[in-house]
Image (tube, rainbow, N blue to C red):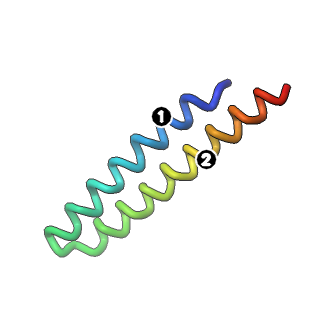
Amino acid sequence: MSGTKDKIKGMANEAAGNVKQAAGKVTGNRETQAKGKAQELKGEAQQTKGKVKDAVSKDR
């Protein structure tokens, strides 16, 4: 499986996390901010996973 799917999912999670963080800041809801940050970090990790998969598949 190529890393493209992981990178796309990662970008989506990162974007959604940023939206949650912004909403939490606007409403003053720290829990929503924290959940948004967690989702953003998950997205970054997914993107990294996709990049690693692509690099490994190129080496084969």
Residue type, label 1 = Ile
Residue 41 x %, y %: 49, 58
Q: Residue drawn at (73%, 35%), measured in percent from left and top?
A: 55
Residue 38 x %, y %: 44, 62
Residue at image mark 2: 48
- The mark nearer the N terminus, 1 or 2, is 1
Q: Is residue 7 left or right of residue 56?
A: left
Neighbour tally class for label 2: few under 14, some 14-19, many 20 plus, Cα within 10 Å: some
Placement of the N terminus among the 4 image quadrants: top right
Q: Residue drawn at (52%, 52%), measured in percent from left and top?
A: 44
Q: Residue drawn at (48%, 49%), measured in percent from left and top?
A: 43
Per the image, label 2 sits on a secondary structure element best described as helix
Per the image, label 1 sits on a secondary structure element best described as helix
Q: Nearer the viewer, residue 29 or 21?
A: 21
Residue at image mark 1: 8
Q: Nearer the viewer, residue 47 or 31?
A: 47
